[in-house]
Image (cartoon, rainbow, N blue to C red):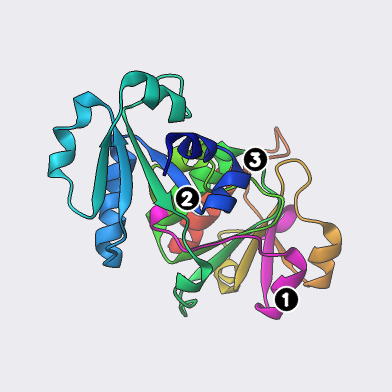
Amino acid sequence: MKLDDVKKLQQKKYRTQLGYYLVEGEHLILELQKSLKHQGSSQRIDLYVSDNYLEWTKNLTGNFNVIGLNSKQMASISDTKTPQGLIACVPLPQAATLPPLQPKERCIYLHEVQDPGNLGTILRTLAWFGNFRLLVSPNSVDPFNPKVVRASMGAIFHLPLELDVKLEDLDKRFDQFAYLDLQGAPVNSPEFSDYQCYLFGNEARGVPNQALKAFRANAFTIAGCGAIDSLNLASTVGMCAYQLSL
């Protein structure tokens, strides 16, 4: 791929058009290598490296095509102010390759989440606990946005992820829904773990009330001292994931 096209992958429309996304930094490249080995994948990955990382790449396993770049070229394709010197051009995963939903796998649905840091942290948290699948609605931040990929710390390679899942289509797949609300039952109650799909909404607007009523979703809450009336979305999902993993 030409460097001009690689640079375009910082934008969602070109990631969709070209079918690739960018992975930058030593830790993320090592996590990518781990996931490719676990999947038994032999796909060829273009890895752009600065001079100081050429020796480092000799210890990589897998089908990496190492391409050396000078500092100016590296800066032109990096999304960061201080490029780390390692950028992989990775094929976007195909929906057809997703494993079927497992009996003990719980689904977390995010409706129109906008903050890259929130989404990256949620990916990281769910991958930590395991047995979760993340469903992301249309009009959400792209999980393959470089900021999300970095915030996920490589979790994006290890978590089943479904994109553009419409809220109105969920009742075709699930019979039971739970969501978070100040007036709900405690999340540490036994029944919190009985649901098929857990709904979390946009940072400002939440999940539309119309959908909650149509799904007959049940409300739960995370107990607090009452001084404030909201929690950060990533923190909320994290606490719920912990509770569901007990």
Front in this rendered view, residue 120 or 200: 120
Front in this rendered view, residue 136 or 243: 136
Name the residue type under label 2.
Tyr
Q: Position of residue 125 (x, y in %)?
A: 45, 50
Q: Which residue is mark 3?
A: 231
Q: Is residue 91 left or right of residue 191?
A: left
Name the residue type under label 1.
Asp
Q: Position of residue 49 (x, y in %)?
A: 28, 32
The quarter of the picture where residue 107 lies is bottom right
Residue 121 - label: none
Task: Give the number of callouts.
Answer: 3
Q: Which residue is mark 2?
A: 20
Q: Which residue is mark 1?
A: 171
Q: What is the magenta range?
A: 157-185
Q: Is residue 42 left or right of residue 4?
A: left
Asked if the magenta segment contains residue 61, the reply would be: no
Residue drawn at x 13%, y 41% as measured from the top left: 58
Report crowding for label 1: few under 14, some 14 to 19, many 20 or more residues within 10 A (C-alpha).
some
Name the residue type under label 3.
Leu
Q: Earlier in the sequence, mark 1 or mark 3?
A: 1
Q: Quadrant of the N terminus?
A: top left
2 or 1: mark nearer the eye: 2
